Image (cartoon, grey):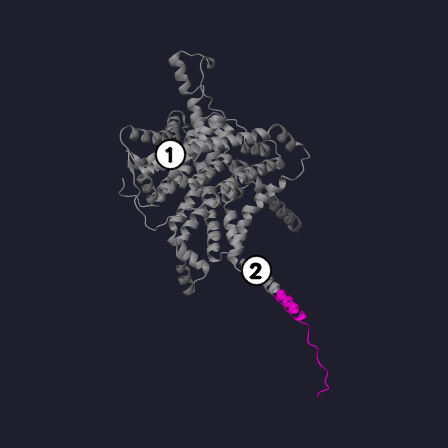
Amino acid sequence: MSEGREHEAPSSSSRPLRVETASKAVVTSLGWRAMPRRLGLTNPWTWASLVVMGMVLVPLLFVGVALFQGDPDGDWAHIVEYKLREVIVNSLILCLGVGSIAALIGVSCAWLVTMCQFPGRRIFEWALLLPLAVPAYIMAYTYTDLLDYAGPVQSGLRSLFGWETHADYWFPEIRSLGGAVVMMGLVLYPYVYLTCRTAFLDQSVCVLEAGRTLGHSPFSCFRRIALPLARPALVAGLSLVMMETLADYGTVDYFAVPSFTVEIYRAWINFGSYALACKLAAVLMIVVGIILTLERVSRGRRRYHHTTGRVRHLPRWRLQGWRAGLAMVACVVPLSLGFLMPALLLLRRAIRHGDVRWQETVSGLAFNSFMVSAMAALGVLVLALVVVYSSRLLPSVITLAARRIGGLGYAVPGSVIAVAIVMPFGWIDNTIDALMRSWFGLSTGLIISGSVAAVVFAYMVRFLAIGLGTLDAGLGRIPHSLDAAGRTLGARPRRVLTAIHVPLMRGAVFTAMLLVFVDAMKELPATMILRPFNFDTLAVRVHALAHDERLGEAAFPALMILAVGLLPVLVLSRLITKSRDTEGMS
């Protein structure tokens, strides 16, 4: 019998505990070490997406922080007591009023041109988008010239009925909150028309045929079947309308309607209070966030899908007699009021009272507008390509968040973005100036703030969502097998993007640049706040001349903005018509 010392076996409870503890430590260690790889931080494309996300997020954070800062001068307390309630009420009335007009016109016209057959339908399909080319502030200028007390309409009525003063008759006041609602509703309804027409084109023919089999009339099918199915598209279009309404500056300023954008501009330019402008901008961001949250909540978990992959021709109901006449009137009225009338009034004003030296004055303005708009379009294209391709190349939390955050800029008005980027740009300029003073004894002054670069940066943040949406749709149609084929042949991701993807989606690239270019041409509040001294664009000059009641001199630059705005309308009409093969149904 061995006399060696016996080894006591460990208890049944101690060994599993040690093993479990050690395994947790190993997993935790490996998890932390693998975290950068899981997030994609080892890939340069992810870091590029982070930079783009920071470009959008950091300025907005500066505005958000300003809401919690003190108010030593009492300006914010004065605004809260005397002005903020009126501004919020006016903004809500504008959103509800403009949204109602846009929904009424957009939904009805989209249904008529998609599901009904009547004379002129094929023309109205694209012509109803034309008001999208007219900025709301140009609408305000032209209709004020037409309907004001000294305008031809009221002058003709006084001459016809023998009225002498305004007390002898009643006429709606164009320069009012109601006038601003009508003006913006007439130019913003194409957003609802676009989204709802796309939804109607993509709807299920089988469901409509089932409704007709059950004895429903065309109007009943529209009310009980097509409209509920198009609800997500309608809400999306109305959200865009409300964002544009809150972002408008020229119309509400010209009509003297207190709104957020007007008060932000006054706080920054007239009173020189950056803190007050930031606080107003922060409140406006909260209002925008509430609208976006309501839109997402109203959508809920509803999803609408086709149960078949086959695409059938939409059954169009042929309208005849008075029904066809009503359909034509329903399409002609918004088209005439939203595009034809202001275009003709501007042309008439330009011919009769325009500046004879308009080529000399407009040429420099056109160059400035085209330069900053082209730079913004190119910048948005590059940033959008980086974000979209990085999320395709490495779909991590960061790249997907960058794509979502990059789209926030379009929901934020230009005045808010302009105020938001002043602080970080000022900090960068002061830091560079301090370094140059300490190293070389030289003062660089303001390099970025108050420069063309600041204007272009604001445009890029504001319209990055347009590029993201357009390029994401174009890149999504390219199969992933092409990526694998390019990598198999030894091409790096950048080479795959430039040699394969960009040529294949050149239509989406062109569309994105065109849409950003035209929107930048029409942008007013951001340009007015950030532009350098003695630097005007067509939009700024039109607004200044109209404010001075020099509508004749403003006619030519306004017509140029309108003409440039026609380009994306034709592109959008072609894209939406090709979304479903409707040929042969006319």
Task: Provide the residue designation for mark 1.
Answer: 108
Above or below for 364 versus 469: above
Residue 268 falls inside the magenta stretch: no
Determine whether, in the image, residue 385 is placed left or right of residue 85.
left
Give SS at disc 1.
helix
Dot 1 amino acid type: Ser
Measuring from the top left, give residue 560's x and y in whole percent. Answer: 40, 35
Residue 443 visible in image: no
Measuring from the top left, give residue 544's x and y in whole percent. Answer: 49, 30
In this view, the mark in front (2 or 1): 1
Dot 2 amino acid type: Pro
At a point 45% along the width and 58% down the height, the residue shown is: 494
Camera-side residue of 99 and 549 = 99
Task: Provide the residue designation for mark 2.
Answer: 36
Crowd rating for badge 2 (residues with CA inside 10 Å; few <14, some 14–19, many 20+): few
Measuring from the top left, give residue 406's x and y in whole percent. Answer: 51, 47
* Residue interval drawn in magenta: 1-26
Camera-side residue of 86 and 260 = 86
Specify which label sits upstream in the sequence, 2 or 1: 2
Camera-side residue of 460 and 334 = 334
Q: Where's the C terminus, which quadrant?
A: top left
Measuring from the top left, give residue 377's x and y in whole percent. Answer: 45, 45
